[in-house]
Image (tube, rainbow, N blue to C red):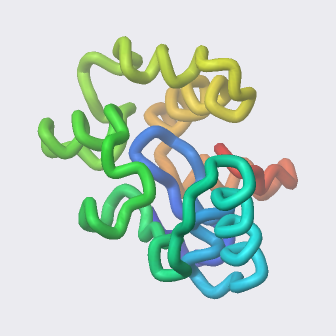
């Protein structure tokens, strides 16, 4: 979801803020970060990727323009015709719970924040976060 403050917020299916993701930022004009990502792949994974491969338009885009085209939550939401996991009657499901407990701190926060988005709506949730000064990688 893109809001009036597009540079700071782009909420993904799972509740992450894509606008704070390095890959998303690199594919939206941050060439320095893009080059760092390319170098990381070369050094850490012994993989050579081209600049045009570092791109992501978020999970509302086509799968060929999405960095994690195999994301279980995105694929499930698409199959069910939903924009966000929290819209599902099964939320939080096994996929969401697995993501939230994978040891990555900002993944854990997505579940509680998605519950809040469901309760008050995304725009109100973003306004709430901005009042708190919490423009984080994830919601």
119, above or below 28, in the image: above
Residue 21 visible: no
Q: Residue furthest front?
A: 46
Q: Position of residue 15 (x, y in %)?
A: 51, 42
Q: On the picture, is 40 further left or further right than 61?
A: right
Q: Nearer the viewer, residue 18 or 66?
A: 66
Q: Nearer the viewer, residue 108 or 25?
A: 25
At x 34% / y 34%, what residue is drawn?
A: 73
Q: On the picture, is 107 further left or further right than 98?
A: right
Residue 41: name its quadrant. bottom right
Residue 97 visible: yes
Q: Position of residue 57 (x, y in %)?
A: 42, 70
Q: Position of residue 124 (x, y in %)?
A: 58, 52
34, above or below 88, in the image: below
At x 51% / y 24%, what residue is drawn?
A: 99
Residue 85: name its quadrant. top left
Q: Position of residue 106 (x, y in %)?
A: 70, 34
At x 67% / y 61%, what residue is drawn?
A: 42
Q: On the picture, is 63 further left or further right than 81?
A: right
At x 33% / y 51%, what residue is drawn?
A: 69
Q: Nearer the viewer, residue 51 or 99?
A: 51
| Count of numbered badges drawn on the protein | 0
């Amino acid at each position: 979801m893109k809001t009036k403050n597009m540079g700071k917020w782009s909420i993904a299916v799972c509740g992450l803020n894509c606008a704070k993701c390095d890959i998303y930022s690199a594919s939206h004009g941050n060439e320095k970060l893009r080059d760092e990502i390319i170098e990381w792949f070369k050094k850490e994974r012994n993989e050579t990727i081209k600049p045009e491969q570092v791109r992501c338009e978020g999970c509302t885009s086509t799968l060929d323009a999405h960095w994690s085209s195999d994301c279980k939550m995105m694929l499930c939401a698409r199959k069910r015709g939903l924009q966000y996991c929290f819209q599902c009657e099964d939320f939080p499901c096994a996929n969401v719970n697995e993501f939230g407990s994978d040891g990555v701190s900002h993944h854990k926060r997505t579940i509680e924040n998605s519950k809040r988005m469901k309760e008050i709506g995304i725009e109100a949730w973003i306004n709430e976060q901005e009042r708190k000064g919490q423009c984080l990688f994830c919601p």
